[in-house]
């Protein structure tokens, strides 16, 4: 016949067996923290001999740092009034609810050496040997807390690395608006909560041509930022669009070189890019596009053209040329480059800002100078998403052509 549970509860042998096989330390103490009973896990936790425990104070037996350093009994050190365990027992003498899993993080001297312990304890009022005492259960969470602290350190390092990557990314953007005769330039850039891969720049190629580009690496984080840095360095090298002595480099040729230098198998990623040159003397715009959102040419009379000629993104196998197109510019024409982060702004309902709202905003503000136009477009996205952080980097680069010139210009 099975043994009744009540019989087990009343069995001292069963209770002793249960207590000694618990992972948690269990002790019975009075209001002065004198120990009257304990289990084996208590000995294992503090590594003290059994014959030194009974009727001794918790601080001396556990090796409390304050009791050891001041060489005083538990309850007599300068820090005992602040002891969380002692204060919880005092609270238990009142009608306060029992204490459950309160932290007790402290150094304990074990085998004569200081050891940082991360503990949690629970207390209950009980009657033991005819006296009001306390049952104290101590849980050792040292390993868990050390792992948590280690993870926090690693997370801090990751955050520092991301901040450094963000600073590098920001430094690759134009430091200020270049001064180009008969041309005005403006931009807005807002990084998302993660490190992204948006990079753009504009610079002189020679005395009559201006080169500009905008690229967007797929994904977020440090890998995307590193690829954008590598691509930016290439574009600013002698083989790129904005490097020294590269006045004869065309957008089409730049993309052909990028296809070769940035294969997917080498970087395990891909990116879109728009490369463009503007001949300010002849009023000619030439561009080549590798899978990037099509720029918009906003004519001075408000007519709008999308420059939608494009090839595949950089990173995909491509043996063919992306090609390029050339268009004539008139005084007052504006060119807007952007990344898909602009269109993918979302409002609280989850709707995207999208192309249509972007085009509607361009029509609404087309008469404004380029600086005000770019700011108006950006502010429209801010209002749309209620000033929340974007899910992706938001980049807008605008150029306004002010007419043909014959003189030199400077940056």
Image (spheres, rainbow, N blue to C red):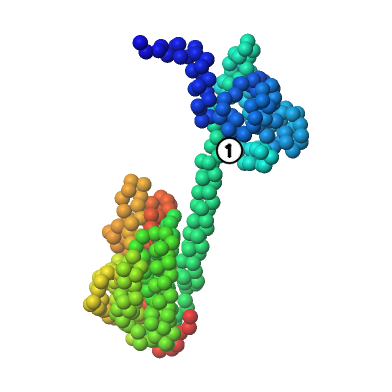
The residue identified by callout 1 is 118
| Residue at the extreme left of the image, as rendered | 320
**243 vs 108: above or below:** below
Q: Secondary structure at mark 1?
A: strand
Image quadrant where residue 42 sits? top right
Q: Which residue is at 47% across, 76% downward?
A: 178
Relative depth, front residue between 350 and 9 = 9
- Residue 409 in the image: state x and y as whole percent: 46, 84
Relative depth, front residue between 127 and 381 = 127
Image quadrant where residue 326 sits? bottom left
- Residue 344 in the image: state x and y as whole percent: 33, 57
Regarding residue 320, the answer to whether it shows in the image is yes
- Residue 403 in the image: state x and y as whole percent: 37, 81
Q: Is residue 20 left or right of residue 311?
A: right
Relative depth, front residue between 169 and 262 = 262
Q: Which residue is at 27% across, 59% downward?
A: 356
Image quadrant holding the N terminus, namely: top left
**219 vs 117: above or below:** below
Q: Which residue is at 64% across, 32% downward?
A: 48
């Amino acid at each position: 016949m099975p043994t009744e549970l009540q019989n087990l509860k009343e069995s001292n042998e069963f209770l002793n067996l249960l207590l000694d096989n618990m992972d948690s330390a269990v002790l019975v103490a009075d209001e002065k923290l004198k120990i009257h009973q304990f289990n084996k896990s208590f000995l294992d936790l503090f590594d003290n001999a059994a014959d030194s425990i009974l009727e001794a104070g918790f601080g001396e037996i556990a090796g409390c740092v304050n009791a050891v350093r001041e060489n005083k009994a538990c309850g007599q050190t300068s820090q005992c009034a602040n002891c969380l365990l002692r204060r919880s027992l005092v609270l238990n003498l009142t009608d306060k609810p029992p204490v459950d899993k309160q932290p007790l993080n402290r150094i304990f001297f074990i085998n004569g050496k200081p050891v940082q312990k991360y503990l949690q304890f629970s207390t209950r009022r009980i009657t033991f040997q005819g006296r009001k005492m306390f049952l104290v259960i101590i849980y050792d969470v040292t390993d868990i807390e050390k792992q948590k602290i280690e993870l926090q350190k690693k997370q801090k390092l990751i955050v520092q690395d991301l901040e450094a990557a963000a600073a590098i990314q920001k430094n690759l953007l134009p430091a200020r608006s270049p001064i180009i005769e008969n041309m005005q330039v403006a931009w807005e850039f807002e990084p998302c909560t993660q490190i992204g891969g948006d990079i753009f720049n504009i610079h002189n190629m020679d005395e009559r041509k201006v080169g500009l580009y905008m690229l967007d690496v797929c994904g977020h984080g440090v890998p995307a930022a590193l690829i954008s840095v590598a691509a930016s360095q290439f574009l600013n090298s002698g083989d790129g669009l904005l490097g020294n002595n590269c006045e004869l480099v065309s957008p089409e040729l730049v993309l052909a070189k990028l296809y070769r230098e940035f294969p997917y198998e080498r970087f395990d990623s891909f990116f879109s890019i728009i490369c463009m040159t503007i001949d300010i003397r002849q009023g000619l715009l030439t561009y080549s596009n590798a899978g990037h959102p099509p720029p918009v040419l906003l004519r001075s009379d408000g007519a709008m053209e999308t420059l939608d000629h494009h090839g595949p993104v950089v990173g995909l196998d491509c043996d063919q040329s992306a090609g390029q197109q050339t268009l004539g510019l008139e005084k007052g024409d504006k060119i807007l480059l952007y990344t898909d982060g602009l269109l993918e702004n979302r409002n609280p309902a989850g709707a995207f800002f999208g192309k249509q709202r972007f085009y509607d905003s361009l029509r609404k503000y087309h008469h404004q100078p380029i600086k005000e136009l770019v700011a108006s477009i950006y502010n429209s996205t801010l209002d749309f998403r209620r000033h929340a952080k974007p899910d992706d980097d938001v980049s807008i680069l605008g150029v306004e052509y002010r007419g043909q010139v014959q003189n030199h210009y400077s940056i």
